[in-house]
Amino acid sequence: MSRRSPFTVRISSLLGIAGLGMGLLTCPFTVSASNNLHVEIKKKGLGKEVVITQGAREWFMLIEVTPENSVVLRQEKEHDKYLVDESETHDRPMTAGEVDAAITDYINSVKARASQK
């Protein structure tokens, strides 16, 4: 039985931890919010997608970023009826900070509207 050198063990451990961290960063994650809102955010290429649910209500936002432009899609539905279905196209790619800010603003606006009802 061969023994590994301490250097090899350290490198293997660091690579394992780095691989686990990268795996966790690419997984969708869930955020608990007030009023039983369920928030799920997924990374989609250079953009992001957020789905917020509360009972039969669902809010959806997708930001798709390409080298030429950015497309923002917003939908809101209750049961199978769409209350909002809109999109906008920006003539330049959004930065990662702009995508994060737009997602955060959208989540906060849904939280505010959901708590009013």
Image (cartoon, rainbow, N blue to C red):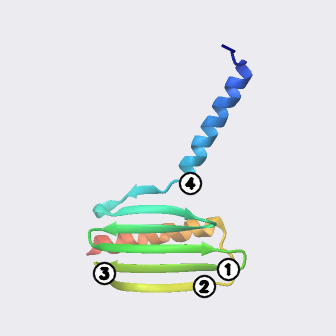
Q: Toward the viewer: 42 or 93?
A: 42
- Work out whether mark 3 precedes mark 4 in sequence or the reverse, and give the earlier one: 4
Q: Position of residue 41 (x, y in %)?
A: 48, 62
Are there few (<14), some (14-19), or many (20+) residues within 10 Å of tag 2?
some
Q: Upstream in the sequence, badge 4 or badge 2?
A: 4
Q: Which mark is first along the chain, 3 or 1?
A: 1
Q: What is the secondary structure assignment of the residue under circle 2?
A: strand
**Height in image: 49 above or below 8?**
below
Q: How far separated are the C-alphas under marks 1 and 2?
A: 7 Å
Earlier in the chain: of badge 1 and badge 4, it is 4
- What's the residue at 30%, 81% (across, down)? 80
Rounded to the nearest whole Å, what is the CA distance between mark 1 and mark 3?
Answer: 31 Å
Question: Do the CB atoms of the residues marked 1 and 2 lie less than 8 Å apart?
Answer: yes
Q: Is residue 34 left or right of residue 85?
A: left
Label 4 is placed on what type of residue? Thr
The residue identified by callout 1 is: 69
Q: Earlier in the sequence, mark 3 or mark 2?
A: 3
Identity of the residue drawn at 39% across and 72% down: 110
- Is 65 or 4 nearer to us in this picture? 4
Q: Secondary structure at mark 4?
A: helix
Q: Amino acid at mark 3?
A: Asp
Kindly identify which residue carries mark 2. 89
